[in-house]
Amino acid sequence: MSTSVGVNVLRWGALATGVFYGLYNQLSISSREKLQAKQREWQHKESLIQQAKAEWAKTQAPAQPKSSSTGPNADPKDPNADLNTLLGITDGK
């Protein structure tokens, strides 16, 4: 009879150990998942902040001034180039 008591104690001890290990393992998995969810949320918020900063910078940037050259346009690749300037013809003024 003493062997059956020893076997029962061993069985209940193994069961209790398994239950406690299962609880511990589940808690560690849950806390890890919560941490990962918080990190994903933080990264999402950071990306939204960066996007908002970029949009704000676009709206607040001063307008690019058009290059208003005082002389005729002598760039041969420009479709609005002055043909007289490209050919070297002067007004004679």
Image: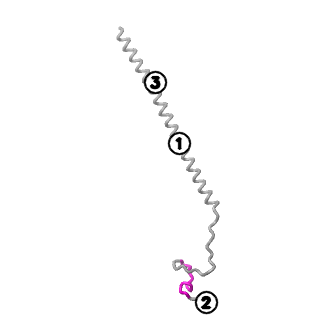
Q: Identify the residue under disc 3.
A: 20
Q: Which of the two labelled residues, at mark 1 and mark 2, occupies the earlier sequence position?
A: 1
- For the point 54% across and 84% down, the residue is 86
Residue 31 inside the magenta-drawn segment: no
Which label belongs to residue 60? none
- For the point 49% across and 36% down, the residue is 32
Mark 1–mark 2 Cα distance, whole angstroms, equals: 71 Å
Q: Identify the residue under disc 1.
A: 39
In the picture provided, is 62 more to the left or to the right than 19? right
Percent of width and height locating residue 67: 61, 73
Q: Which of the two labelled residues, at mark 1 and mark 3, occupies the earlier sequence position?
A: 3
Mark 2–mark 3 Cα distance, whole angstroms, equals: 99 Å
Residue 83 inside the magenta-drawn segment: yes
Label 3 residue SS: helix
Q: Inspect the image, locate mark 2, and give the three-letter code of the amino acid beneath it.
A: Asp
Specify the segment rendered in magenta. Answer: 78-88
